[in-house]
Amino acid sequence: MKGKQAWTDNYIKWFKENTVEKALPNGWTEIATPLMDRHNDGLVIYAKEDRGQIILSDDGYLLSDMEMNGVSVSKRMKTIEHFMRSYGVHIVNKKELQIIAAPNTYPVKQHLLLQAMMGASDMFIPSKARNPNIFVDDIVKFLDENDIAYTQDIQFQGYSGLIHKVDFIIPKRKTYPERLIYAINTPNKANTKMTLFNWNDIQKVRGEDSQMFAFLNDTKKVPEEVLSAFPAYSAIPVLWAERQNYLEKMAV
């Protein structure tokens, strides 16, 4: 556990040292982070204090990026709104992601907004090679077809005090531990790093008996550095093509 704590501490240190804030003339503060979207560009958000509250916004970046890359946002709006609500994020005027924070909840809310942006940038990426479903919907279908009981879109507070969203949780039963499932549509270094940080932070609170599975869309070959990263943190990578091999581990 000591090594895992050091990993979490290093992650937080890295994030702080590589985040740059810039005050803008319009009263907003630009916050450039080291977290990457699917273009390997650093995510940028904006913050503004308003009557004792802090508004955090993506200034319309994410939905605009989806439109420019082949996603019909208007057709998928209900699905996108549902996805965002699981992070506590709202869509304003059908174009801008916003989350409201109090001064004492600002770090938590900022983390949730960035998680939502990374998650949506991953989950809604267009691909002619896949079916038109969202990857998380494919997982829902798989769990339902195999009578696996689960709860979707759960938030946990980690050891750091940050709130993390988990895509699915399968409850503990008899000899089977609690199992947390993450859906990663485009496995890469950036979203693997975020997922492992979230899991590691949660595990310190939930206990060593909890297990984590990462369902990886392997339409394209998953990098070896991604596959090897999960076992180092007692997490199980599940290639989508091999999902049937893990049914026994998901029994309830």
Image: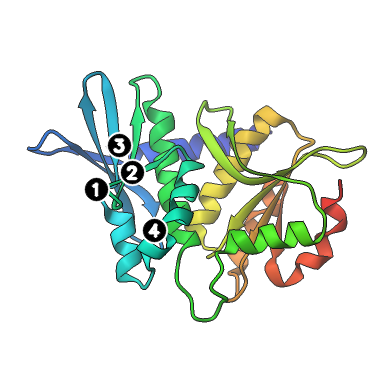
**Which structural element holds mark 2?**
loop
Query: Which of the two discs, 1 and 4, labels the residue nearer the N terminus?
Result: 4
Q: Residues within 10 Å of mark 3 (few under 14, many from 20)?
A: many
The C terminus lies in quadrant:
top right
Is the residue 100 above or below the residue 85 in the image? above
Residue drawn where x is 28% and y is 55% of the image: 61
Residue that numbered label 1 is attached to: 59
Residue on which disc 3 sits: 56
Q: SS for tag 3?
A: strand
Specify the amino acid type for callout 2.
Answer: Asn
Q: CA distance from mark 4 to mark 3?
A: 18 Å
User: Which residue was labeled with disc 4?
Assistant: 37
State the quadrant of the N terminus: top right
Report the residue at 28% width, 61% height from top.
64
Where does the image place residue 225, in percent across and percent down from the top left?
A: 59, 63
How many residues crowd around disc 2 within 10 Å: few (fewer than 14), some, or many (20 or more)? few
Quarter location, residue 105: top left
Q: Nearer the viewer, mark 1 or mark 2?
A: 1
Task: List the single residue furthest toward the left.
Answer: 25
Q: Do callouts 2 and 4 mark residues in contact (Cβ within 8 Å)?
A: no
Q: CA distance from mark 3 to mark 2?
A: 19 Å
Whether residue 140 is visible: yes
Image spot of residue 205 (x, y percent): 66, 28
Upstream in the sequence, badge 1 or badge 2?
2
Disc 1 element: loop
Q: CA distance from mark 2 to mark 4?
A: 16 Å
* Amino acid type of the residue that numbered disc 1 sits on in the rendered structure: Asp
The type of residue carrying mark 3 is: Leu
Please name the amino acid that badge 4 sits on. Answer: Asp
